[in-house]
Image (cartoon, rainbow, N blue to C red):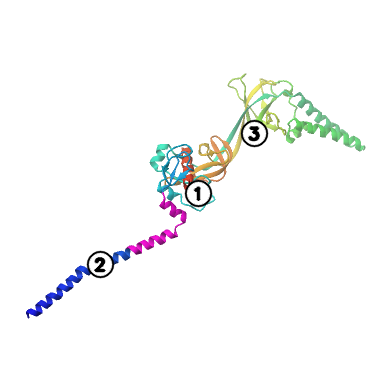
Amino acid sequence: MLNKIKSALCGKKIILYFLIFLLPFTSLDCAKKERESISSEHEEHKERLPKKVQEKEQKQLYYCPMHPTYTSDKPGDCPICNMKLVPAKKEEHKEHLPEKKTEQAVEGQAVVEITPERQQLIGVKTGKVGWREMTTVIRTVGRIGYDPELYTTIKEYREAIKAREKIKENPLPEVLKQADSLVENAYHKLRRLGLNDELIQEFSQDKEIPISLLHAQAGDMAWVYAQIYEYESALVEPGQEIEITSLVFPGRTFRGAVKSIDTVLDPMTRSVKVRAEIANPDGFLKPEMFVNVTIYIHLGRKLAIPEDAVLDTGERKLVFLSLGEGKFAPREVKLGYSAEGYYEITSGLREGDKVVTSANFLIDSESKLKSAISGMGEHKH
C-alpha cells in the first residue's frame, strides 16, 4: 500500500516537472512564429509600396526655407544663401506622395491644409462665385467738336446724292457713272472722318447738319470728340450713355449718347476717337472746350468673382478654391472684363464655388513651398 502511494506521488512529480520546463519553450516558439508572421506581412506590404515612397519613409530630408528646391538627406547649410537647412515634416511627405494629375492640377502649386486657428490668425476670407449684373465705366478726356471739314463733307455728300437723283433718267452712261463716283467719294471721306454707316444714312436724308461743328448755338446738339485706348475700343458702341463735365461749369453734368467710333487708330497714341452728341440747350458748350468724359458700358449678367480673389502672375491667373475642412486648392482661371471690383469668369470656376479673397498671397506661398517639397526626391543633392 505504501509503495503504491509512493509510485503515485512520483508520477505526479514527473508530470509537474514536465509542465514547468516544457511549457515555456512551447510558448516562446508560438510567440516567435507569430512575430515572424507579422514581420513577413509588413515586408510584403513594404514591397507593394512604390520605391520612392519606401525611400521617403526611410530617410529624413532637409530643405532650405529660402530655396525649397534645394534638399539634402543630412543637416547642414544651404550652399546658395548659407541658411540652415530645416527638416521636412513626415506629414508633409505623406501629403505629397506622388498622385495622379487631374485636369484641375496647377503646375508648381499644391493643395494646402490650414487649421481654423491659423486661418483666423492670417485673416483668411472667402467669397462665392455668382452671377451679377456688371457695368463698367471708361473715364477719359475730350473736347467740344469744331470740325469745319466734317460739316463741309456732309453738305457735299448731300449735294452729290441730289445731283444723282436729278440725272438718273439721263441716257448717257458716262454722266451716271460720274454722279455715282461723286457720291462714292463723299461717302468714303465721311467714313474716313469717323462717321458710321447709320449716321451717314441719317445725314443723307433729312437729319439737320449740326451747326455746332462751326460755332456754338443754343438749342443745337453739341458734338464731343473723346479719345479711348485701343484695348477699350471693343467695349464702346453707338447708343451707349455718356456724361461730360467741365471746370467752366462746376457741379453741372451734360448727358448724351455715343454716335460713332472712328475706324482708324492713331498710330502715335494707340487710341481711337469716339463721337457723341450732347444736349446743349443754353449754348454753354463751345467748340474746342476741354471736357471730362464718362462712358457707361453695360456688360450684362456675368459669372463673376471679387478682384481680390485673383492672383495675376503675368503668365496665368490663379485663385484658391476652398474645398472645406481647411483645405485650399489652386485653380487656374480665365477672365473677361472687370467692373465694379469684380472679374468676369469665362472658365475655371462654377456658380457656388467658394474662393479665397484675403490672405491668398500667404496661401500661395505655402502652396508653392509644399509643391517644391513634394519634388524633393527629384532634386536631391
Disc 1: which residue = 378
Q: Nearer the viewer, residue 216 or 294?
A: 294
Any mark on residue 212, and which? none
**Residue 48 magenta:** yes
Image marks 3 and 1: residues in contact by CB distance under 8 Å: no
Label 3 CA crowd tier, 10 Å (few <14, some 14–19, many 20+): some
Left or right of residue 56, residue 177 in this image = right
Q: Earlier in the sequence, mark 3 or mark 2?
A: 2
Horizontal arrangement in the rendering, residue 195 relative to residue 20 (left or right): right
Q: Residues within 10 Å of mark 1 (few under 14, many from 20)?
A: few
Residue 240 is tagged as 3
In which image quadrant can residue 286 be found?
top right
Say which label, 1 or 2, has the lower sequence index.
2
Residue type indicated by callout 1: Glu
Indicate the amino acid at tag 3: Gln
Q: Viewed as shown, does residue 280 lie left or right of 342?
A: right
Q: Nearer the viewer, residue 237 or 81?
A: 81
The amino acid beneath tag 2 is Phe
Q: Which mark is residue 25?
A: 2
Q: Which type of secondary structure does the marked residue at label 3 adopt?
A: loop
Q: Which residues are magenta?
A: 35-59
> Quick one: SS at disc 1?
helix
